[in-house]
Amino acid sequence: MLEHLTAYLQAPRWHVAFSGGLDSTVLLHQLAQLSRRQLLPSLHAIHVHHGLQAAADAWPAHCQTVCDGLGIPLTIVCVKVQPGASLEQAARDARYQAFCQILQPGELLLTAQHRDDQAETLLFRLLRGSGVRGLAGMPRQRPLGQGTLLRPLLEQSRGQLERYAHAHGLSAVEDPSNGDLGFARNYLRHAVLPTLRQRWPQATATLARTSEHLREALELLEEVAGDDLRAASTPSAWPWLQLPSLALAPLRELSAARQRNALQTWLAARTRLPDARHWQGWENLRDAAADAAPHWVLGDGQLQRGAERLWWLSGAWLRPVAAGGAWPDPQTPLQLADNGTVRLSGTPAQGRLSIGYRQGGETLLLPSRGRRDLKRLLNEAALPGFVRSRLPLLFIDGQLHAVANLGLSASAVQLHWTPPTNAQRLR
């Protein structure tokens, strides 16, 4: 195990995801033993209590006893699992959200998934029709929040962990739901894999090795995607938007398979990826008429097309802007509801200042051009359509006086807008 941990010996802290089950108990015990032989970062255990079954109410006390015996501090986090189609997925989302909130920059989260878990993951995703990315299984390490998640036991079998626990007299809790064959993973674990092993004793190891081969294939695909994305990652004409975007023309030049590969790589850090049935949404977005305003809704946001670019929108960008309002102190930046902030440069004319948004029919008197329709000015600027409805406008005594960030103003006064962030935390 140490060979996988050596690169993280300078991390500020090692956290262990500690459910109290056999796997995480073995991992915690192995790390405690290792810390007695070698100088390691400080160890800290995290127990997430989901509150989904009565038996789990006793687990925090058990985990505290184990950690006290090992001299490792424990944090117990109670989470609320949101109802949904998959209770397993909802519990996982809540658990990893808790981990993300605890992890500080550079810290490590160690989890106890092992070789049998990897084989189950491959079978589960194979039956769901996953592509190479899904069949590559669980990576040994990946970014998580401000730190890194590491799975140091992926090469060990469940049997090895059981023998270790027996040899060291370790006690562990048993989740009653682990025997419920209504859960897909439990069915694979208790009904499918044992049958496979009767005919092919090395089935688990072989399946895990297949995941390793597929991960190598995935790395090659990501290299190709990196080249394709570099060609499409030209800066937009509106750097102040600070939104992830890609130029559409270089993507159109690729084959359909390379388009999907590039987008999967680009979207992986931003959203749960669509399955094969939903990629029609990309083709509709790509092939829509030039004057259309298509969008592709995904799990954690959406792709929109504008000014011959693809734009990733999430968070506040998907919420409608509230009505504008008065700006009583123009010397102070104004916070807008779900729409960032605005500030002024220059001294405005006397009058009642307010911020509003386009309703239709607005005109602006430009010193060098006379009165112009706002719609035509925005068309000239080629501003993406999804921005126009939330672009702040400065009014003085009810008259349009300036348009944010486009240099359009009836005087020397300029309105500067810092749009909302597009931040989301992917688990």
Image: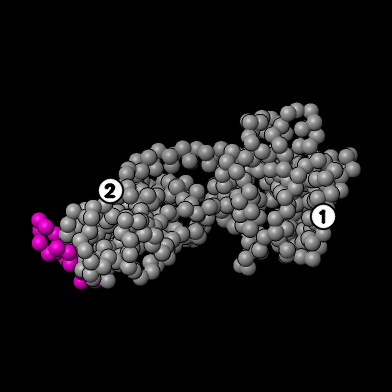
Residues 411 and 212: in front is 411
User: Identity of the amino acid at label 2?
Assistant: Ala
Q: Position of residue 72 (x, y in %)?
A: 77, 42
Q: Position of residue 260 (x, y in %)?
A: 43, 50
Element at label 2: loop
Q: Badge 1 is on which residue?
A: 61
- Left or right, 335 with respect to 381, comes to right
Image: magenta residue range: 360-376
Q: Residue at x 77, y 58 (%)?
A: 178
The quadrant where residue 30 appears: top right
Magenta-span inclusion, residue 371: yes
Could you tell me if residue 405 is visible in this image? Answer: no
The quadrant where residue 342 appears: bottom left
User: Identity of the amino acid at label 1?
Assistant: Ala
Q: CA distance from mark 2 to mark 1?
A: 57 Å
Element at label 1: helix
Between discs 2 and 1, the one toward the N terminus: 1
Q: Position of residue 246 (x, y in %)?
A: 36, 48
Residues 194 and 92: in front is 92
Q: In the rendered structure, find residue 237 and report the number of the disc placed on it.
A: 2
Nearest to the eye among marks 2 and 1: give it: 1
Q: Residue at x 10, y 62 (%)?
A: 370
Q: Residue at x 41, y 64 (%)?
A: 337
